[in-house]
Amino acid sequence: MESSLTKKKEKIGVFVCHCGRNIAATVDAKRVVEEILKHTAVVHAEDYDYVCSDPGQELIETAIKEKRLTGVVVAACSPSLHETTFRETVKRANLNIYKCEIANIREQDSWVHEDKEKATEKAIKLTKSAVEKVIRNEALSPVKVGLYKKALVIGGGIAGIRAALDIADAGFPVVLVEKKPTIGGRMAQLAETFPTLDCASCILTPLMSAVAHHPNIKLLTLSEIMDVEGYVGNFHVRIKKHPRYVEPDKCNLCNECVDICPVAVPSEFDEGLSLRKAIYIPFPQAVPSSYLIDIDACLGTSPLICGKCAEPEVCGPEAVNFDDQEEIIEEDVGVIIVATGYELYNPTNLGEYGADVYPDIITSLQFERLLSPSGPTEGIPKRPSDEKIPKKIAFIHCAGSRDERHQPYCSHICCTYSAKHALIFKELVPDAEIHSFYIDIRAVGKNYEDFIRRVQEETGIHYTRGKVSRIYEQNGKVKIFGVDTLLDKRIELEVDMAVLALAMVPSPAIQDLASKMRIQIDGNNFLQELHPKLHPVESATSGIFLAGAAQSPKDIQDTVAQASASASKALGILTQEKISHIPTVATVDEDHCSGCNLCISICPYGAIKLVDEIAHVEEVLCEGCGACVSTCPSGAIDLRNHTDEQVGVMLKALAGEI
Amino acid sequence: MEDEIEPRIIAFLCQWCGYQGADMAGTSRLKYPPSIVSIQVPCSGRIKMAHVLEALTKSEGVLIAGCHVPNDCHYVSGNFKCLKRVTLLKKLLEQMGVDPARVRLEWISATEGKKFARVVRGFTHELEELGPLNLDHTNPNDSNGLLGVNEK
């Protein structure tokens, strides 16, 4: 039988706590001491009223010094409560914190049992098993590594902007990467924001400007992440920057290039409701404040074909540069915040709603542009088909949300923004008749319920609980068919325009990005947080944080809160001189590793790689879960201070065989 | 072995959920039989089925408590890894002639003290019905030399 004798010279001290009567009423502490002293490795054991008190801790320190203890077991309350306390105690007596173990004889013994005899027997077993474990614990120190004190923020919407500003304001450099030609994201497209009806631009554009002028922020637009290597504190990122063909520093926004450009294509910013030129600025307040050329739409540089915008009499400052090249930018950063935002569910997937067929069945973002004073109709809501102001309008909630055939989840914001749309519309068209089809009204957020009530009172909106089955446009009228599930009645309604509150979906590029960064995606393709309550903004990869609608559908308030939370978590790392990492990680016995790769595929952190056909654990990446240990068919991997040997001998102790 | 003896249970409790749930049972002073002893593991995905078998040689039943599927695991998917292994182990136990009900996998969160106590009481009762298990590969009566004994 394996016993403590296998390790020589271990001298263990055991301290049994009475916890007043909490333990002593059910567990005979004196007997535990008596029994544990029979163990060959135990050279000291005593019981005390409150081991966690100052005099109690003093007992431990004194015993360590006088008896030259190599390990300590405290039989007391749960390690969740005082493990840290007792680790600090042994540290003061120059013992490694990992040479202290707790036997939980309160929460999992005295408090849950009544039979004193049996509870005492159990306490002896639990204490013995802790003794066996501590004998075999290695003295460990946290793994320390240096770090790059710089952050990468991916996505320049309100989430990325907020996170970048928070980190930059705290004095750390930030690289902000945005795929589109400007930052601002979805929020820049909005007319007004619920529930306060603040104009979106009035809140957002000052922040965009702050990003543009912040000395700590390096802004890369038209840029994408190519790959990410490394680990927390030490990420190496390659970024592809697409050519803009206009030099922002030279461009003075005179607009002459736009005037002369002969090409017109649908504007992305106006959701296709207006046209823009091949050389354009997405919207006047764009950051960087500069034109760019959509090279796919541009006729070309040859003077025979076009190239008019580059002529010196058009572009005086010679900002147009057709020789602009793609650039690969490399950055070393310590932390990454992913804030890639959302898109609307593609309405062509909802054929029965006809959004891609009929001009007056539009998406909620298109309606948002129609309501915006800077939109294609200068804030006067006009039907796309005949530019008439609609008098009767219907909002269709849950278009693609809460629908097993499309997206099963609630998109969180549609109820409230549809109410907002109704309110703004009613202000612009006071004699309007407004209908709204919903499954449930989910106005979840501070003051949102009040907002819905206000909208009901001020607009006279007709809420119909029910699902719309079919929408089409005929003879200039939009026809809606469905069921009123409260009255159990079929509905037929004729309106001038219908607005679909389409589901929020994460950016399609997120899958590729997530796999590049080894972060997880949930069942609906949103980014997966490490834990919904304990680690709501952390990804499973240490040092990578999540913010905004990329993580789940959310409104601007929650997005900003999450962005600041991510930034503060990121700052928690950036303000360290060295990063500490738990030392209780997996280790590989190189002689036994067959290089089979199984551990590599099972590790959720990408912490194991093959080096010369042998598994190698990158300690900084390993979180110590032990999944590889139980997977390795050769038994070549073990977990520090939770080894197979320790489990085996603890089982023996628990069974009373030691 | 006499039938009145409380069936011994060895529990593997994940440090984030199962162990915390057991602590919660304690904090709530919920009572359950003292014949259960436990080992804290970092994650249910750490548990080797060899250790479960080893524990079965020293008990009437093994309880594993991990974080709820699908999303509660602190190490992304250790609970699923454990679930797969236990499913396989149960098949193996059946082939060995051991009732697979002797290994019980439960998802118990840190707040589910009541569930922990209920599971231990229920499992104890179930193991009482099943009776003692003498799974010992060193047992000379175990002629086939494997862990198997036919319970029926």
Image (spheres, helix red, strand yellow):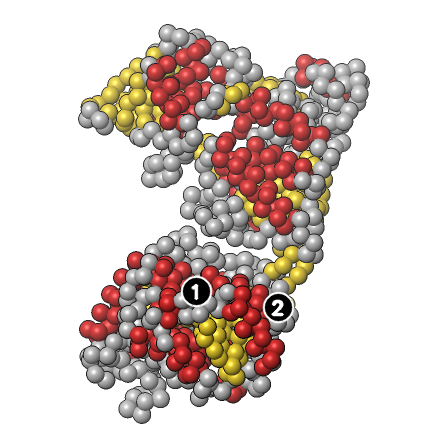
Q: Which mark is residue B70?
A: none
Place of residue A334 in the rendered image (x, y in percent of width and height, measured from the top left): 66, 50
The residue type indicated by label 2 comes to Arg
Q: Which residue is mark 1?
A: A78
Element at label 2: helix
Q: Residues within 10 Å of mark 2 (few under 14, many from 20)?
A: few
Element at label 1: loop
Whether residue A256 can be seen here: yes
Q: Which residue is mark 2?
A: A92
Residue drawn 48% across and 72% down?
A74
Question: Which of the two residues, A192 or A305, is positioned nearer the viewer here?
Answer: A192
B98 relative to A498 in the view: left or right: left
Against B1, residue A144 (above or below) is: above
The residue type indicated by label 1 comes to Ser
A630 relative to A570 in the view: left or right: left
Q: How far apart, in angstroms, are the residues tagged by discs 1 and 2?
A: 21 Å
Quadrant including the C terminus of chain A: bottom left
Q: Earlier in the sequence, mark 1 or mark 2?
A: 1
